[in-house]
């Protein structure tokens, strides 16, 4: 197996965090030295996002000797650039999962998702997280009136069948009292869900992993993996021999493994941060410390930072290069929802690369007896990717129940092979984008 990350980082300066609001507000960690020479480890982790850092932490806490290799900086990819929303549930709703896999399997997937939120909340309470605060409360907002009865029925389903009481339906009047926009017709509020600063969370995971004894190396792009017992990994300046390997690359996998790449596709998403708003103006946008995600296929999602900036995400692109003017791309959907922000300046604009699967379920896979892969979180990864690291650790320790539950979900290959799947995806996304507008 070999990889090239050049195309996947074409929008970035190697070894530097993007010019995001998060990077400007975070307290950075000193760089971790690149891997050098010949190294030996019980476990080698490829990727320094949520999955890799969480796996390093939980493995080191179990006593494993862990080496983590990150091509850029820890939290450099989607883990340090996303909307910061922590949702329970899978990316696919429970009723669909019940229909596809049966009630018992769907219930197990639901339980695992709740564990992912609990884990994030518990981790933010550790001292090493420092200034990363978990803020409870997420709103799903329906942008079409015809979606509202289905949302109400789904809330009833979760409350009655799953005893999930933190969620409640909100009607048109209430959602417009909370969100200062005429764009929405109803939705739900989930007070078990929440939001946080995603880069601060990633850096906190890195501090925790180091404190537990994991060895982290930045600037260490893996160029080759040779399967075997043990496996061997190569970077430009090191060769690592490890009994186990965990691939935690998500949207930055490149060509490192064809089996995963056929099922996991990188796409780009974009966020802006406004200038700080006055308390009165902030209350005119969102009343209460809630984050919001709407019902569009290409989701609009937004929340306020702790220094009163609106962080608004919207718009996607396919292929490798970001659009030339990210501000303009995101300003359009932002003003469709909040036209009253027309005079507000956008102080930051950035993009990031995530990974989706055909059926929007995470891809957990055992590529060989000693090689595990976790990816394809499909925009729902802050909590699930963090839990994936914990699941990786328990799986290597011989407790594979949760891994098997997630890995049992079949993930189809994208059609057409590498040359054609991006054009096919673009056509599909254009169709869904038109459906959002009709």
Image (cartoon, helix red, strand yellow):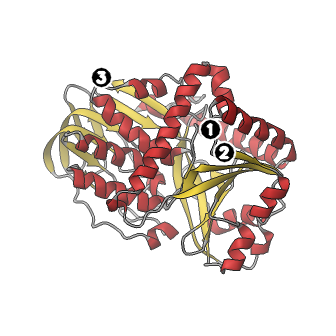
- Above or below: residue 359 compared with residue 141: above
- Distance from the alpha carbon under mark 1 to that under mark 3: 37 Å
Picture coordinates of residue 291 (x, y %)?
Answer: 63, 58
**In the visual, does 358 lie left or right of 25?**
right
Point 47% across, 62% down: residue = 133
Q: Disc 3 designates what residue? A: 369
- Decide if residue 219 is in sight here: no
- Decide if residue 46 is in sight here: yes
Q: Are marks 2 and 1 in contact (CB under 8 Å)?
A: yes
Point 78% across, 57% down: residue = 175
Picture coordinates of residue 360 (x, y %)?
Answer: 59, 35
Picture coordinates of residue 69 (x, y %)?
Answer: 28, 48
Determine which of the numbered discs, if any, sits on residue 164 in the image. Answer: 1
**Marks 3, 2: nearer the viewer:** 2
For label 3, the crowd category at 10 Å Cα-Cα, with few meaning under 14, some 14 to 19 and many 20 or more, is few
Point 27% across, 29% down: residue = 397
For label 2, the crowd category at 10 Å Cα-Cα, with few meaning under 14, some 14 to 19 and many 20 or more, is many
Between 53 and 108, the residue placed more toward the observer is 108
Determine which of the numbered discs, if any, sits on residue 132 in the image. Answer: none
Between 84 and 252, the residue placed more toward the observer is 84
Q: Disc 2 designates what residue? A: 167
For label 1, the crowd category at 10 Å Cα-Cα, with few meaning under 14, some 14 to 19 and many 20 or more, is some
**Marks 1, 3: nearer the viewer:** 1
């Amino acid at each position: 197996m070999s990889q090239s990350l050049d195309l996947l980082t074409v929008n970035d300066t190697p070894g530097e965090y993007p010019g995001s609001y998060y990077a400007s507000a975070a307290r950075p960690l000193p760089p971790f030295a690149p891997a050098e020479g010949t190294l030996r480890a019980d476990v080698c982790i490829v990727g320094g996002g949520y999955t890799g850092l969480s796996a390093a932490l939980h493995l080191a806490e179990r006593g494993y000797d862990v080496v983590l290799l990150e091509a850029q900086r820890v939290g450099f990819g989607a883990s340090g650039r996303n909307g910061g929303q922590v949702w329970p549930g899978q990316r696919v709703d429970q009723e669909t999962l019940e229909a596809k896999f049966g009630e018992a399997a769907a219930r197990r997937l639901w339980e695992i998702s709740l564990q992912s939120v609990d884990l994030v909340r518990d981790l933010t309470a550790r001292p090493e997280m420092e200034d990363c605060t978990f803020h409870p409360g997420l709103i799903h907002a329906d942008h079409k009136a015809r979606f509202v009865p289905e949302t109400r029925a789904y809330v009833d389903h979760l409350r009655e069948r799953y005893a999930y009481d933190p969620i409640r339906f909100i009607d048109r009047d209430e959602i417009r009292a909370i969100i200062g926009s005429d764009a929405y017709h109803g939705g739900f509020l989930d007070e078990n869900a929440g939001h946080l600063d995603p880069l601060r969370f990633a850096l906190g995971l890195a501090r925790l992993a180091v404190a537990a004894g994991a060895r982290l190396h930045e600037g260490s792009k893996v160029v080759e993996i040779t399967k075997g017992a043990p496996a061997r990994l190569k970077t430009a300046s090191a060769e690592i021999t490890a009994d186990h390997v965990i691939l935690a690359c998500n949207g930055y996998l490149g060509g490192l493994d064809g089996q995963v790449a056929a099922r996991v596709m990188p796409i780009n998403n974009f966020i802006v941060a406004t200038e700080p708003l006055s308390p009165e103006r902030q209350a005119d946008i969102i009343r209460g410390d809630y984050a919001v995600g709407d019902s569009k296929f290409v989701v609009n999602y937004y929340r306020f930072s702790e220094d009163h900036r609106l962080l608004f995400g919207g718009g996607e692109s396919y292929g490798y290069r970001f659009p030339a003017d990210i501000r303009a791309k995101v300003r359009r959907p932002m003003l469709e929802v909040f036209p009253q922000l027309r005079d507000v300046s956008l102080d930051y604009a950035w993009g990031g690369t995530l990974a989706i699967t055909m059926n929007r379920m995470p891809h957990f896979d055992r590529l060989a007896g000693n090689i595990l892969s976790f990816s394809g979180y499909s925009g729902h990864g802050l909590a699930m990717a963090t839990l994936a690291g914990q699941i990786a650790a328990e799986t290597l320790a011989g407790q594979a129940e949760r891994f098997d539950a997630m890995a049992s979900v079949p993930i189809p290959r994208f059609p057409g092979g590498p040359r054609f799947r991006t054009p096919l995806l673009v056509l599909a996304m254009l169709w869904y984008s038109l459906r959002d507008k009709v």
